[in-house]
Amino acid sequence: MSKDLGSFLNDCQRWIPERSPVIVEGKLTRMVGLTLEAIGLNATVGERCLVIDRQNRIEAEVVGFQDDKAFLMPVQPISGLRSGARVVPLESASELVIGDELLGRVVNGFGEPIDGKGPLSCRVEQSLNGVVINPLHRQPIREPLDVGIRAINGLLTVGRGQRLGLFAGSGVGKSMLLGMMTRFTTADIIVVGLIGERGREVKEFIEDILGDEGLARSVVVASPADDAPLLRLRAAQYTTSIAEFFRAKGKNVLMLMDSLTRFAQAQREIALAIGEPPATKGYPPSVFARIPQLVERAGNAEAGGGSITAFYTVLTEGDDQQDPVADASRAILDGHFVLNRRLAEEGHYPAIDIEQSISRAMPQVVSAAHMKQAQTLKQVWARYHQNRDLIAIGAYNSGSDKDIDEAIQMFPVVRGFLQQGLNEQVRYQESVAQLQALAPGQPSAAPSPMKKGRPLARPQRSQ
């Protein structure tokens, strides 16, 4: 071949556009419930497809296969499909657009705005599956995060980059508590995922609980209960991806996901639909593999990066703390706060049961004096409740036990310390100063004085 001919062929090769990969379409053969079966489809698990039948174009995702059959789960309502419909793989991966323009906006699981404020101009595409961080490269949890709630700041201090569970039954104030944290926290960015909750609650949370001030520095991803289970899963992953985007920019992010239980239930619906056998109380094994995959994406980044401090609400149906999802979540999270129905019924808000709650990162982020004072206050609270029935019926004789006597005297002021109004903000230093005032014999744990108000006074013991 002459040199001139070889050069000519090379030029022709540059002029010819790069050939697109061959797309092998499949054919819809069966539909049972929410599960679609297709044959002849050349697609991998997790790949997105379009099911096309006349004017219907429904997006679905490959969730499994058996022999030559592929199982798909739609992310949109199914209507008008029939046997023989085309199933076309999509070239784009499972990515959604993310950017700074999301701040102050409310989007659905597709990344589409639903707040009526116009389209988004985000251009950054980010995978829904996240990037795995080497656990040895993560920054350790060493700094407290102020959430503006006295009971948490003082007794259950949250570390920046910690992952915690908020365990509660229905109607005990978990949404109110989340709203208080979004308004009062010192985090740079708040990302809220409302996954599988009632549609009515989405608007109420945004307008009544979050408010304009909280929404201004927040991103809300809403996927109500009537969304397809795959869309609810995607919304939870999208919420985490948004938090990862801001963490990569060096921001300290507070991520609130309500709820992890609905995420698990969505995975259960998908797994059972494609034939996975149930294991624990109807939950198939894949559920307990999905939860840590989602939770482990939160936390601190590598040195010099930002952080994601995450709260996941866990719905304990019937106030059962041994629910499979609650039990699995408790084991992989860095602590959990339990909301007690009895406290809520007594008008005690936030209804945090400090006896059952724990922050596993607290010893690493507070001083030894602060830790000792928090333990002392929890002991006083626990001692009173252990003897509450005897005290209520007058069966306890004053002077029989000095510790119980002190618990009786301290109980009103401890209860006042744990309660807080919905619109009342208590900074971290104020919380520590008020905690210190309840145990004046302890060494100082607050390096700076309170900014406002007076610390709660410790009652004097009678002589």
Image (cartoon, rainbow, N blue to C red):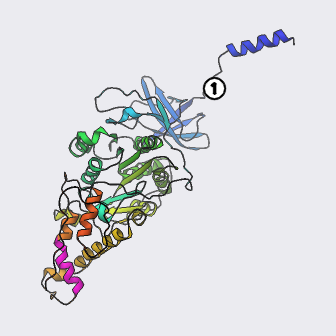
Of residues 399 and 42, the one drawn nearer to the viewer in this rendering:
399
Side of 176 where 6 appears, left or right:
right
Side of 382 where 31 appears, left or right:
right
Any magenta on residue 411? yes
Is residue 261 shown above or below 63? below
Q: Position of residue 165 (x, y in %)?
A: 37, 58
Of residues 395 and 413, the one drawn nearer to the viewer in this rendering:
413
- Where, by quadrant of the figure, is residue 158 drawn? bottom left
Is the residue marked by circle 1 packed among few (<14), some (14-19), or many (20+) residues within 10 Å? few
Residue at left 41%, top 40%? 231
Magenta residues span 402-412
User: Which residue ends up furthest to the right in the rendered image?
Assistant: 1
User: Which residue ends up furthest to the front in the rendered image?
Assistant: 448
Of residues 313 and 66, the one drawn nearer to the viewer in this rendering:
313
Quarter of the picture containing the N terminus is top right
Q: Position of residue 210 (x, y in %)?
A: 25, 44
Disc 1 designates what residue? 22
Is residue 87 shown above or below 168? above
Asked if one can make out residue 111 in the rendered structure from this viewpoint, the answer is no
> Magenta-highlighted stretch: main secondary structure?
helix
Is residue 207 shown above or below 456? above
Q: Position of residue 371 (x, y in %)?
A: 35, 69
Residue at left 33%, top 66%? 357
Q: Position of residue 150 (x, y in %)?
A: 26, 60
User: Which residue ends up furthest to the bottom in the rendered image?
Assistant: 400
Please state which amino acid type lies under the numbered disc 1: Val
Quarter of the picture containing the C terminus is bottom left
Residue at left 25%, top 73%? 440
